[in-house]
Each structure stands twice: as structure tokens, then as C-alpha cells.
Image: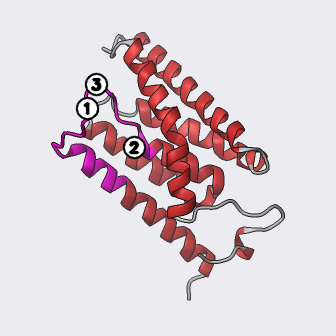
Amino acid sequence: MIDPVTLQRLGFAALFAALATLIVFMRMLPLDTGFAGMPPPDIIVLLGFAWVLRRPDYVPVVLFAAILFVTDLLFLRPPGVTTALAVIGLEALRSRAGLLRDQPFALEWATVGAVLVFMLLAERILLAVFFVGQVSFGLSAYNLLVNVAFYPVVVAISVWGFHVRRLAPGTHAAEARMV
């Protein structure tokens, strides 16, 4: 018999993988979304950040890294660069999840925005050191703004749509109500 808490964790990890697969599939379809010139938000990274701040046990780092590495390969980005920086950002947020639990959402949003800024700057510096071609800084900054602006939408969908809520202070995952 499998423990209900372990089953719930595995279920949410499978849900994360399924959502990431759906997002990749939708981005690969030749659809005209009507947002000409606007870069799409990196929903997989935002979803991982939102989930890890609410329930750090729902996003296994190996799964997150594997999904992002596959997206690097599929979307022809430098393999591993975005993945490594996103994993570092995910783990930085995971270590602060307990501190941000009782804080207002604006502080969480600012923290995620700061992590995204550091990821952008680190990627630009790393690619420049190795003389890898990059898009213009303006387009990268615009993509950052789109990601930061889209984060509350991802959080709202996660909380209200998928019921990824924070644990109440003083409770453990074993005491959490099954959703």
C-alpha cells in the first residue's frame, strides 16, 4: 500500500509533467496567437516557481531539470544554460519558501521577479563569455517583463485551478488535507 502523501506528491509531479508537455505541444503548433512581436511567457519556469513556493515537495528538481533540458533542445536554445539557471533559481526559491509563506503576495512576486532578473543577467553574461549569439537586450528585457507580468496569472491558475496551496503554519505534509 502506498502512503497517501507520497501518492499525492507523485500525482502532482505527474500533473506538472503533463502540463509541461501540453505547454511544449501548444508552443510547437503553428498557431497564430495574435500577439505579433510579443514573446511568449516561459510558463514552465513560472509554474515551477509558483508550485515550489507553495508546496516544495510537488516539484522534484530532477523532473524540472529534465523538462527544461528537453525544451532547450526543442526550442533550439543553448542546451543546459537556461536549464541550469532555472534550477538554481528554483532551488533558491525552495530554500526561501518557508520565509515567504507568511508574507504578502507582492513580496513573493518581487522575489520571483528578482530571481528572473538574476537569471537573465547570468544568462547574458555566460553567453557573452563563450561568444554565443544572443537576441538583443531589449527583447530579453521585454521577455522578462512578460514573465514577471504573467506570474500572478500562473499563481492564480495553480491555486484555484489545481489546488496547489500553501500548508498552514505548523502543519506538515502528512497532516495536510487531501485534495
Residue under label 3, please give it.
37
Q: Which residues are magenta?
A: 20-44
Q: Earlier in the sequence, mark 1 or mark 3?
A: 3
Above or below: residue 177 compared with residue 91: below
The earlier-in-sequence mark between 2 and 1 is: 2
Mark pair 2, 3: CA separation: 23 Å
Residue drawn 84% across the image and 64% down it: 170
Name the residue at 41% across, 20% down. 140
Q: Which residue is mark 1?
A: 76
In the picture, the disc for residue 68 is 2
Residue 7 drawn above or below residue 98: below
Q: Which label sits on residue 66?
A: none
User: In the rendered view, does 156 fall on the left or right side of 56?
Assistant: left
Percent coordinates x, y for residue 82 in the rendering:
43, 32
Q: Earlier in the sequence, mark 2 or mark 3?
A: 3
The amino acid on which the numbered mark 1 sits, given as a three-letter code, is Leu
134 or 46: nearer the viewer:
46
Q: Quadrant of the N terminus?
A: bottom right
Q: Are marks 2 and 1 in contact (CB under 8 Å)?
A: no
Based on the picture, tell me whether residue 76 belongs to the magenta stretch. Answer: no
> Percent x, y for residue 4?
60, 81
Q: Nearer the viewer, mark 1 or mark 3?
A: 3
